[in-house]
Amino acid sequence: MSRALPFLVALLILAAWWLFSLTQPEILLPSPLQVLEAAWTGRARLAEALLYTALSSLGGLAIATAIGLGGAALFLRFEWLERALYPYALFLQTVPIIAIAPLLVVWLGYGISVAVTTAAIVCFFPILTSANAGLSSPSRSEIELMQLYGASWIQTLTKLRLPRALPTVLAGYRSAVGLSVIGAIVGEFVGATGDPVSLGYLVISSSRSADTATTFAAVLASAALAGALFAIVRTIEKRAIGAWHGHS
């Protein structure tokens, strides 16, 4: 029953959407069938856009992972570095990405580099903070036991801190993967040229031409992409953590 509940809620949402769409013109709110028809008619273009945005999201996520995990390890090793740089990492998170994106176009030019960079910026902080908290989670007695056995700092990091940090880091990734899709699409709003087509460009171009059904299809495709990435992280989490996973 618990597994069927999300599907029941989805059916109720679709039914409410369909009923409400009967009272509105298509240009304001297309029905689910009209959105499905638009997605099927433009399926080749939609698939190309989905692939392009997925690559941008994963590229940004990879960059954020390298900087976030590396930064967390450096913060752990050099406390003065954390005190010096952490406020600026927080500041980067608080700046609206839509305000940075036009500057990135000036600096990087049009293309996928803008979408990758905006994706990296928005998902960097959750990875950094979760890794920072996870790597610091072992108790003093555990650290002292590693030192008693003559373990080096690297050995303590790889054999104690990283395994203990894994649940926290993967929890951070649950947020980061969704944010990477949002960041990529924001970058595509200002940096995409339409060749190749992306979800962000498809949303902008179809809304400007009053093709609301295609706009809805692109938005739903982006939500499906974020959901798929989230499901992948959850699968990795269950397989990697095992009994630690619990019901989180």
Image (cartoon, helix red, strand yellow):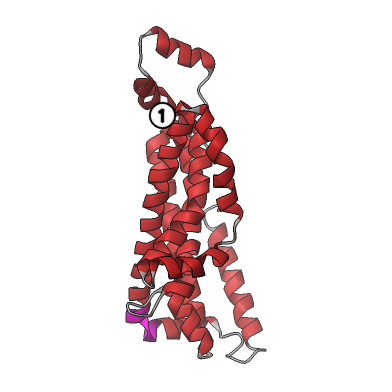
Give the answer, above or below, for where 222 lies relative to 242.
below
As drawn, is 58 to the left or to the right of 130? left
Give the answer, above or below, for where 172 lies relative to 190.
above
Q: Amino acid at mark 1?
A: Pro
Predominant SS along the magenta part: helix
Mark 1 secondary-structure assignment: helix
Query: Residue 166 in the image: x percent, y percent?
Result: 44, 35
Between residue 83 and residue 94, name the one nearer to us.
83
Quadrant the C terminus occupies? top right
Q: Which residues are magenta?
A: 40-45
Local packing at callout 1 (Cα closer than 10 Å; few below 14, some 14-19, many 20+) is some
Query: Residue 26 in the image: x percent, y percent?
Result: 58, 90
Q: Residue at x 57, y 52 (%)?
A: 93
Query: Residue 56 in the image: x percent, y percent?
Result: 38, 63
Q: Residue at x 38, y 82 (%)?
A: 40
Is 147 in the magenta? no
Give the answer, above or below, for where 234 lies relative to 211.
above
Q: How many marks?
A: 1
Q: Residue at x 46, y 61 (%)?
A: 118
**Extreme-top residue of the structure:** 148
Between residue 18 and residue 159, name the one nearer to us.
159
Say whether residue 174 is visible: no
Q: Residue at x 61, y 87 (%)?
A: 28
Give the answer, above or below, for where 13 lies relative to 244.
below
Between residue 33 and residue 75, name the one nearer to us.
75
Query: Residue 149 in the image: x percent, y percent?
Result: 37, 8
Residue with the mark numbered 1:
163
Say whether residue 237 is visible: yes
